[in-house]
Amino acid sequence: MQIHPVGTRALLIDLPGLTAVMDWHAALSAQPLKDQVDCIAAATTLLLTFETPNSARAAAEALPEFRPQAQRAAEPRTVDIDVLYDGEDLEEAAAHAGMSTEALIDWHTSTEWSAAFGGFAPGFSYCTPANPERALSIPRRDTPRKAVPAGAVAIAGEFSAVYPRVSPGGWQLLGRTTTPMWQSHAQPPALVQPGDRVRYRAVNSLPEFIADDTTAKRAPARLPRMEVLDAGLLTVYQDLGRPGRGDLGVTPSGAGDRASAATANIAVGNPRGATVLENIGGLCLKALTDTVIAVTGAQARVRLGDMPVHLARPVLVTAGHTITIEPPTVGMRSYLAIRGGIVADSELGSSATDVLSGLGPAPVQAGDIIGVLPRSAAMTDAQLTNPLRVTVQGGTTVGRLRCVLGPRDDWFSQQSLAAFTSTEWTVSPDSNRVGVRLLGPDGQMTIERTRTGELPSEGMVAGSIQIPPSGQPVIFLRDHAVTGGYPVIATVLEEDIDIAAQLPPGARVHFDLVGENRED
């Protein structure tokens, strides 16, 4: 057993194998450690996240003496999944396995699979052959796809799984199914649970896909306050997200720049975690009744009608008047809070829009009516400062991110680590709420690994900096996948994720290591 720090608020525990992982997971889920938020099982690791750095340090000191009891295996349930084997990677995967496509399909359908653990996305269940002698090892793609279609049946390493929704991914695609893998209104919401037996059946056609029941998303009564005239490039609802649900494959999500979201709420007298609008590219609203709003985040011109207003200040908007947030000049995301607290459809206890999994309310569109809770709030606060923490140099947004090495820095040489910290990286246009993709100078600089082969999928946190085989770093943001299979060279401090969320395409990024450096 080996413990790796993951930033300052999480620990990754290496264990001998899946059986040990499940024993540890069962014990620490039943009796969590002090301030433990999440406990995420993977093939050979367990990820524990905590509310504070002090709690993570205390856990790291206590866990070496921890000895969980072995868990009793329950009688497995069998789940049948119909598959149309027409995947884009079928021939490539067969070549990796040294067999024909027909033989690969026969192996996949004749193997009885056992669901080991959930992760990556809601309803994504990692399955291994129930008979280890049936296992094959198929490498992931060198460069993950930006969008894998919902229902894609895929393999990677020794695992097989179904992508429940459209999401990025690097697994080899064998085919597709229309069997719903996740339904929020169901109990449990994931079709395949740890311990279940899964059988894939080859078919020549598939029935129509049945979408998740929208009754899972519910909202209490609300008072209409504003009408959306222009939603900009992207406007979504955000709050503090869904922490502690990693076992379901549900990432915490929530506001990208939490300090800005909290400041907007405090300015108008709302609780810090009330729902706000997170906007990219401009926003225009018309007040339906007299109300008070505040805008924070990216440096952008905000107008009440034609009159400019200050960021982080409560502003009275009378009925019929408009509030406009223009596209930012510095930073990426703006936050708008309305006095009383915005109300939106909720799912799994949160109104956060998770762009990776599709949980939460749909993005805001022109014509939508924004409502608030029918209750009074605390006093407004006009003495706040906008907490934006990026700067401008030569007309370009620049951010410095503090990070802690690991947990998989041992996959890289000292030379690669030095290149990682000394390089001025540029944010790629392909970035979003899931992750910030980085490019080196002239798009050529890459970080080379010293190890070959595949890293078994393991838990990830916001701030994890993955290095895929392409060598171009990716910083996970709030809507990151729960698990990932590329080594994490370093982890951005929780306090600096707000900075990463404010880096637009073309921004320059510097990494500053904190804590102890590795000694080879």
Image (cartoon, rainbow, N blue to C red):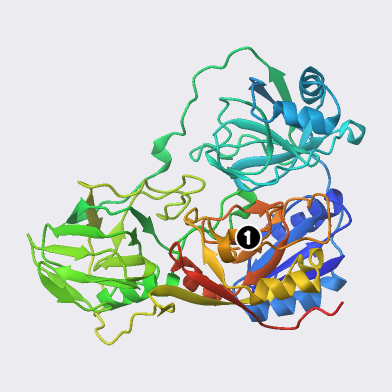
Image position, residue 397 (x, y; %):
42, 73
Which residue is outermost to the front? 442
Q: Please indicate, yes or no, whether residue 31 appears anywhere in the rendered image.
A: no
The residue shown at (42%, 55%) is 352
User: Residue 472 at what x, y percent from top left?
Assistant: 64, 59
Identify the amino acid type marked 1: Gln
Total count of labels: 1
x%, y% of residue 58?
73, 79
Camera-nearest residue between 319 and 516: 516
Q: Quadrant of residue 79?
A: top right
Residue at x 23% of width, y 71% of height: 301
Residue 148 visible in the shown view? yes
Q: In which quarter of the image is residue 308?
A: bottom left
Which quarter of the rendering shows the C terminus?
bottom right
Residue farthest right in this picture: 133
Mark 1 lies on a secondary structure that is loop
The residue at the point 11 percent across, 61 percent down is 289
Give how far across and how far down residue 399 sits, in percent: 49, 75
Q: Which of 520 and 353 is in front in this view?
A: 520
Q: Residue furthest bottom?
A: 383
Quadrant that contains the N terminus? bottom right
Tag 1: Cα neighbours inside 10 Å, few (<14), some, or many (≥20)?
Answer: few
**Residue to which mark 1 is pinned:** 444
| Relative vertical location of residue 196 with respect to residue 143 in this rendering, above or below | above
- Can you say whether 147 is above or below 276 in the image? above
Residue 277 lies in what quarter of the image? bottom left
Compared with 89, 404 (above or below) is below
Q: In this view, does 519 lie to the left or right of 369?
A: right
